[in-house]
Amino acid sequence: MVYDVIIIGAGINGCTSAYFLNKAGLKVALIDKGGIASGGSGAAGAFISPKISKEGVLKEIMETAHLEALKFYTTLFPDYTLQKPLLHITKTLEEGKTLRGFKNETTLNLTSLDENMEILLTDEAKNSESICFSNGAVVDAQGVCHALVEGVDFYQYEVQSLHYEEGVWHVGDLRASHIVLSIGAYEKIIPLPYLTLRGIWGHRIDIQTSTKLPTILHHYVSISPTSRENIMAIGATHNVHYMPTDEEPYDIEEGRKELLEKASKTVNLENIKIVHDYAGLRSGSNDYVPLLGSLVDAQATLSLYPQLQYGRAVTSSAFVNYPNVTMINGSGGYGFVLAPYLASRLKEYLVDKKPLDERLSPARFFARWIKRKK
């Protein structure tokens, strides 16, 4: 079977990329060994919230991405999106300082704290620095991922290698002129010795509770009503130590306990019943800025420019890239916020021939890797 693009990895980045490219008229195939949103994306809280941070590339990107994501989900996928005000509560004095600076600069619409919400908060939460956004949202992670890929050919199997010949990529029996890699923190399929992604284990629980929340909450964990009646989501806990390859299996019971203990520091929830657990591995870049761009062929580049190993400068535009391969990855805990932003830029790159943002290029890690090798 011949396609314009084969996307490997069916998390939120892969599914959103498939959506934009398919809508642009390209013939798209999507491959994943576990299924649609079977990993970290399916376990995500999928909260559409801004990032409270200091100046920098990520802050600039996130401000735009947040607004684009709100419009994207609420307009195109309203059946999978619940809109509520969003209350963000800081955990430390340092976070409070950052939040005060953010309040002075943000152009986002703010609102006062709902009186019914204030009654439910613990004393610790009430006495911490906070901000309440008028427009927040939470997305049905698995539901929206499946909706995104309607009309896209999906293949469930593990891709272990790629083969490029005469301008065409071979993936098993499939063929395509372009490959998009959105495989999270798992094996990269092609040699990328310079690129290591942070694995972040996520756990979300859906619960039934007699407590009604009028807002979405972010504090020690994220707590939110959902589009399903009487179901609330708590998650996702970040465990940077656990990996699916570990010999010891992940302790679901301990994860539940941790989520509920952290939630109790923020709000008083009554008559709790666990409905479902979701767990999976997300990926974050080591500098916290997401990845979107071509991938450097390290061996070919070093063979062509051996002087790189001795500290000689070579412009990044001269690096040898794998032909027609683009990575979209490394969004960490903001995958559902960043996915529409990144996927729309990917579509502009592949279809409209617009250049990608160099600040997001994976090549930045190749340059740093070379410096460490000197």
Image (cartoon, rainbow, N blue to C red):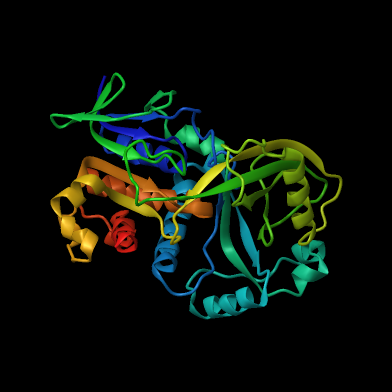
* Number of numbered tags placed on the structure image: 0
Which picture quadrant has residue 273? top right
Using the image, determine if residue 126 lies above or below residue 329.
below
**Residue 123 image position (x, y, % from top left):** 82, 70
Foreground residue, 86 or 204? 204
Q: In this view, does 36 lie to the left or right of 357?
A: right
Please give the name of the residue rendered at 47% of the width and 59% of the height, measured from the top-left corner: 66
**Residue 26 image position (x, y, % from top left):** 25, 33
Please give the name of the residue rendered at 86% of the width and 45% of the height, measured from the top-left corner: 271
Q: Quadrant of the N terminus?
A: top left
Please give the name of the residue rendered at 40% of the width and 55% of the height, measured from the top-left corner: 290
Foreground residue, 113 or 351? 351
Foreground residue, 274 or 285? 285
Q: Quadrant of the C terminus?
A: bottom left
Which picture quadrant has residue 251? top right
Using the image, determine if residue 368 lies above or below residue 152.
below
Q: Can residue 230 be seen in this view?
A: no
Q: Can residue 276 be seen in this view?
A: yes
Q: In this view, which residue lies farthest toward the right?
A: 271
**Residue 248 image position (x, y, % from top left):** 67, 37
Q: Is residue 286 left or right of residue 294?
A: right
**Residue 90 image position (x, y, % from top left):** 66, 70
Please give the name of the residue rendered at 35% of the width and 40% of the height, measured from the top-left corner: 181
